[in-house]
Image (cartoon, helix red, strand yellow):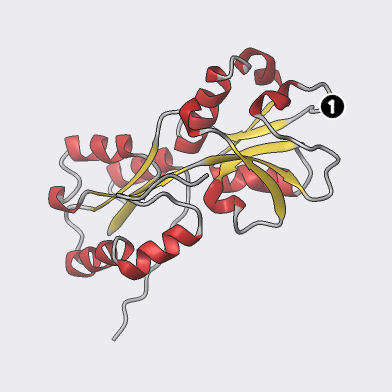
């Protein structure tokens, strides 16, 4: 017998709010540890299930037919780049990392007027894929499976995107939820995560 997993994708902050309001969730896979810690403080997760499952990276993404050839985040200040998409840093961890990287590179003030905010990192990529923006700062995990050009942003420019999961307290499917969480951090799950560019607990960084 197999258990069917139903996914609900969105920005981490918005998903956390849904859980706080009682949404029927079995496992929460957060794009950073802060939202898991917040739910833990409210007694909303099964504490012994909290686990790091991967560290994310961000990239500069452009379409393959774009005339732009970006090598460095500071290229975003170039005059021919009019619109840059990032996930909304108010509730999306990848947007927070993008903002931190722009600030660390000392180009936040220059690039901020060009910014277009996506509700989550997947929508941010769509803005660039459809040509609505020139460049997007998105997750490496999305970049590696996309038809586009991308350049890694140095990880020292932002705080680690430590992606963390936990089983939600009160779920009627705790046994199955624990099994799914174990699968993600097990040999098969880690192989999948590695394929999509995540740095795994105990492993070296991608280059």
Between 11 and 56, the residue placed more toward the observer is 56
Between 150 and 19, the residue placed more toward the observer is 150
Secondary structure of the residue carrying numbered label 1: loop
Where residue 187 sits, quadrant-wise, is bottom left
Residue 90, x across and y down, in percent:
47, 28
Disc 1 crowd rating (10 Å Cα; few below 14, some 14-19, many 20+) is few
Residue sitting at x 29%, y 57%: 27
Q: Residue furthest bottom?
A: 1
| On screen, residue 68 above or below 194 | above
Residue 17, x across and y down, in percent:
35, 40
Q: Image quadrant for the N terminus?
A: bottom left
Residue 161, x across and y down, in percent:
41, 38
Q: Is residue 99 visible?
A: yes
Q: Is residue 105 left or right of residue 100?
A: right
Residue 197, x across and y down, in percent:
50, 53
Between 7 and 29, the residue placed more toward the observer is 29
Q: How many marks?
A: 1
| On screen, residue 154 above or below 50 | above
Q: Is residue 25 left or right of residue 40?
A: right
Where residue 128 sits, quadrant-wise, is top right
Task: Write down the residue under mark 1.
Answer: 80
Q: Is residue 192 left or right of residue 121?
A: left
Residue sitting at x 20%, y 60%: 171
Residue sitting at x 34%, y 42%: 16
Q: Is residue 115 left or right of residue 19?
A: right
Where residue 189 sits, quadrant-wise, is bottom left
């Amino acid at each position: 017998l197999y258990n069917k997993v139903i996914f609900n994708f969105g920005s981490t902050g918005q998903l956390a709010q849904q859980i706080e309001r009682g949404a029927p969730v079995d496992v929460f896979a957060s794009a950073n540890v802060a939202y898991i810690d917040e739910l833990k403080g409210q007694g909303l997760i099964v504490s012994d299930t909290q686990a790091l499952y991967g560290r994310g990276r961000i990239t500069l993404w452009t379409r393959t037919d774009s005339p732009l050839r970006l090598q460095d985040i500071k290229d975003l200040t170039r005059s021919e780049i009019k619109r840059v998409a990032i996930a909304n840093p108010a509730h999306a961890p990848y947007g927070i990392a993008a903002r931190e990287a722009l600030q660390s590179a000392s180009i936040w003030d220059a690039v901020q007027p060009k910014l277009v905010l996506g509700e989550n990192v997947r929508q941010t990529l769509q803005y660039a894929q459809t040509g609505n923006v020139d460049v997007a700062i998105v997750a490496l995990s999305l970049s590696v499976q996309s038809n586009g050009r991308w350049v890694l942003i140095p990880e020292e420019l932002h705080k680690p995107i430590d992606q963390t999961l936990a089983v939600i307290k009160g779920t009627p499917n705790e046994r199955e939820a624990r099994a799914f969480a174990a699968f993600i951090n097990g040999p098969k799950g880690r192989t999948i995560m590695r394929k999509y560019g995540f740095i795994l607990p105990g492993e070296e960084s991608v280059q």
